[in-house]
């Protein structure tokens, strides 16, 4: 049974609250249209995460090919105490894009924050994961905020006034921003945290193309399904008439740019309707659905410094495939 088909448990713990920002997790028609009218065509990766997209992402994380999840989890499991020592007591943890919230669970017993706030566009998964977290950690105040984590100033009114703010941004989701946008996002985080605020951020590191190409082309086909599910979502929520059989999944690492690009390739010449709009595709033309930027330790350190942080600690695995940076706001 899929998580989205699960009957909601009756029990809502007293320490759990769910709120929705402006548009919550809804897909934005005009944002999608303007991306599809650009050359080259693109759609924001945040729209990959409807309920089915989040399930498919969880399946991707179980594959041998997609190494980032197990590598990052292993760092938290081995180094939780060292991380807690850098962060200090009496904290409010704000997690950006928590997904199933399984990573923060590895840190909660050592961090012992007063409040946990998770911000994610994937409404159903966020509510289920937040409620389960509150039920398992009854000493913790859990607030799930459904919406785009981009404009972090919007979160201010939900943040308790006392306690050291700690931003947790795992999964290398920061790699889904282009570097300029990642810098701006970190600057926004810096404003929200104030001086002395801490960020724990997971960053995927550069490595041979063969490993990266494999990670985004798993033999199980979950990444392909995750990518194509975007078209199913657009059809359902925006009433478009994409035919998923007329597009194929393509993902590859560009060593020159230091990023994995994910695309949906039109296999034929075709026209697609969305509301009043008609979008034309040439054979081989693509919709760019995601970039996953891969950093070096030095490259990400420079970006963090430009955004107003210093690197307090850098943790990695034996192969130096994934980095966890602990940043301190100047
Ligand atoms: N942190 C989890 C999940 C990573 S997948 C992990 O490491 O496994 C990326 C998550 O970020 C998804 O849950 C997705 O819904 C969320 N997300 C992506 N873009 C977002 C945005 N702009 N605003 C809010 N949530 C976003
Ligand atoms: C969430 N994000 C960092 C993942 C990534 O690796 O870019 C999403 C993903 N896309 C394809 N596979 C996984």
Image (tube, rainbow, N blue to C red):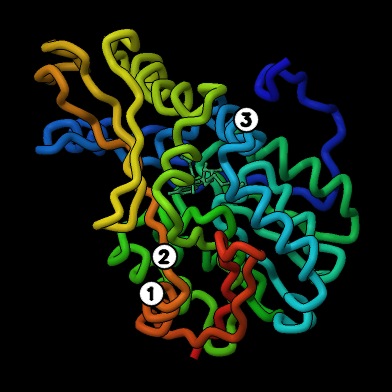
Left or right? Give the position of 204 relative to 110. Answer: left
Marks 2 and 1 close (CB-CB < 8 Å): yes
Asked if 38 appears above or below 325 in the picture, the reply is above
Tally of numbered tags: 3
Disc 2 versus disc 1: distance between alpha carbons? 6 Å
Q: Position of residue 78 (x, y in %)?
A: 79, 65
Give 137 or 60, whichever is nearer the viewer.
Answer: 60
Density class for disc 2 (Cα within 10 Å; few <14, some 14-19, many ≥20) is many
Nearer mark to the viewer, of 2 and 3: 2
Q: Position of residue 54 (x, y in %)?
A: 57, 33
Disc 3 secondary structure class = helix
**Which residue is pictured at 28% across the width and 66% down the height?**
180
Give 309 or 149, whichever is nearer the viewer.
Answer: 309
Q: Which mark is residue 260?
A: none
In which quadrant will I find the N terminus?
top right
Q: Which mark is residue 59?
A: 3
Q: Which residue is mark 2?
A: 295
């Amino acid at each position: 049974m899929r998580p989205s088909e699960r009957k909601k448990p009756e029990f809502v713990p007293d320490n759990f609250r769910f709120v929705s920002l402006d548009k919550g997790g809804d897909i934005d028609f005009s944002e999608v249209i303007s991306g599809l009218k650009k050359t080259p065509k693109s759609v924001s990766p945040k729209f990959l995460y409807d309920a089915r997209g989040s399930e498919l992402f969880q399946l991707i994380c179980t594959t041998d090919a997609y190494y980032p999840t197990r590598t990052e989890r292993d760092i938290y499991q081995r180094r939780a105490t060292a991380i807690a020592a850098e962060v200090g007591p009496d904290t409010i943890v704000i997690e950006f894009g928590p997904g199933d919230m399984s990573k923060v669970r590895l840190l909660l017993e050592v961090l012992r924050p007063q409040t946990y706030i998770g911000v994610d566009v994937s409404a159903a998964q966020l509510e289920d994961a937040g409620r389960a977290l509150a039920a398992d950690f009854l000493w913790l105040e859990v607030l799930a905020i459904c919406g785009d984590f981009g404009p972090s100033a919007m979160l201010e009114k939900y943040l308790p006034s006392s306690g050291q703010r700690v931003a947790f941004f795992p999964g290398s989701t920061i790699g889904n921003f282009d570097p300029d946008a990642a810098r701006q996002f970190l600057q926004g985080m810096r404003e929200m945290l104030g001086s002395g605020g801490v960020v724990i951020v997971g960053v995927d590191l550069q490595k041979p193309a063969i490993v990266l190409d494999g990670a985004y082309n798993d033999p199980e086909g979950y990444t392909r399904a995750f990518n194509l599910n975007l078209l199913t979502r657009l059809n359902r929520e925006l009433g478009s008439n994409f035919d998923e059989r007329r597009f194929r999944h393509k993902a590859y690492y560009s060593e020159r740019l230091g990023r994995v690009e994910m695309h949906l390739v039109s296999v034929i010449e075709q026209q697609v309707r969305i509301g009043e709009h008609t979008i034309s595709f040439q054979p081989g033309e693509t919709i760019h659905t995601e970039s996953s930027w891969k950093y070096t330790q030095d490259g990400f350190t420079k970006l963090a410094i430009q955004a107003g942080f210093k690197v307090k600690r850098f943790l990695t695995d034996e192969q130096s495939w994934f980095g966890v940076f602990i940043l301190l706001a100047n």
